[in-house]
Image (tube, rainbow, N blue to C red):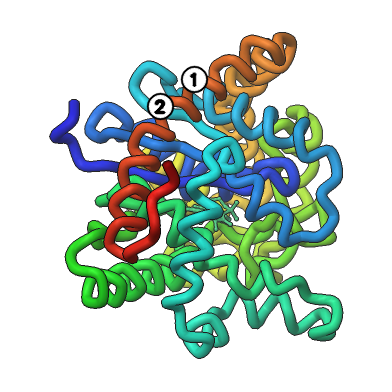
Amino acid sequence: MADRPVVFSGMQPDGVLHLGNLLGALRPWVQEQSLYRNYFCVVDLHALTRQEPRDLAQKTREVAALYLAAGIDPEQSTLLVQSHVPEHAELAWILGCFTPMGWLERMTQFKDRSRKLSSERIGSGLFSYPVLMAADILLYKTDLVPVGEDQRQHLELTRNLALRVNRILGDTFVIPRAKIGSIGARVMALDDPSSKMSKSADSEAGRIGLLDPPDRVRAKFRRATTDSGTAVDLETASPGVQNLLEIYRSLTGAGERELAEVFQGKGYGRLKEVVADVVIQELEPIQRRCHDLLQDPVALDRLLADGAARARGSAGATMAQVRQRLGMLPAR
Ligand code: TYM
């Protein structure tokens, strides 16, 4: 077990998880869970950058329950809440002192989010968000970080930061690699296939919530944006149609041939029905298990406490090394 590569990944409890989170991250985590030593984190400190932390405890439990419901096995993987392991925030401060401002100014997610607000209203946590993410990853000497496409730039910053600190302090951190799938790593909004499906978009119509009931899932797919055509042509499919096909491929593992057999020349109405069917089938058992898990918050909290205790073992060892290399006076 100890010699397996270390995996770390996380999700923010800043809304209900959606199909993009499932296909881009959660499902790949589950599928490859037995190959690695895993840490799966609910990153509640990151969610504070939204500056409207409503129902944070409830959402944190919900994300943890969805991890388990989707198949994360707490025997095989360490499941933790970020704020339960204070070393995350401590390492983030230290790394922040080594992170050039220019690197953070170039982050496209920061630019996108901050464009909507004046600098008087943006918390500096939004700016240093990628530093906390780097701390999450580097704390566990992580080898691989399975994420969706939108996290690629943050991972690049994490790698550069680890290289920089290693140069200054001597070999301290493992240089992690992003693990981004070839299918499902960028699920687009159903109502606007030019932007990614996201928890924060105002429009509910664009995302399939993992807890959406079947009739809502079906209604959202029926209204999904396609184009002015009527039948599927795999060669020339528009972004909206491609997005639906990709969701299907991601869930069924269908190859090009099967895709052609099922959809080529068939109407968009049928495409939407078939894709809605496979999504509903996938979500049904997840929703049932999630509902059951949330019935017993005490058991869930106990499991998260176990996970945090395990995580603190590794995180504490890294921090002891970092403090020593920085020449900090040990507390007696
Ligand atoms: P978050 O909470 O935005 O998203 C969680 C995971 O879901 C992926 N994802 C998507 N994949 C495909 N299509 C989409 N439309 C889509 N939307 C989201 C994300 O890429 C991510 O893998 N910064 C991270 C959380 C984080 C983290 C970490 C991740 C904090 N520390 C350390 C890895 C390692 C985030 O905001 O994820």
Q: Is mark 1 on a helix, strand or loop?
A: helix
Position of 304 with respect to 170 (left or right) is right
Q: Look at the image and tell me in which quarter the C terminus lies.
A: top left
Q: In which quarter of the image is residue 188?
A: bottom right
Does residue 197 appear in the picture of this structure? yes
Along the line of sight, which residue is nearer the eye, 149 or 268?
149
Residue 185 versus residue 304 in the image, above or below: below
Residue drawn at x 75%, y 84% is 115
Along the line of sight, which residue is nearer the eye, 167 or 82?
167
Which disc is residue 310 wearing?
A: 2
Does residue 265 appear in the picture of this structure? no
Residue 312 versus residue 133 in the image, above or below: above
Q: Which percent across, then down, holds residue 201?
A: 77, 61
Which disc is residue 306 wearing?
A: 1
Q: Which percent across, then down, holds residue 170?
A: 19, 68
Position of 101 with respect to 159 (left or right) is right
Q: Are marks 1 and 2 in contact (CB under 8 Å)?
A: yes
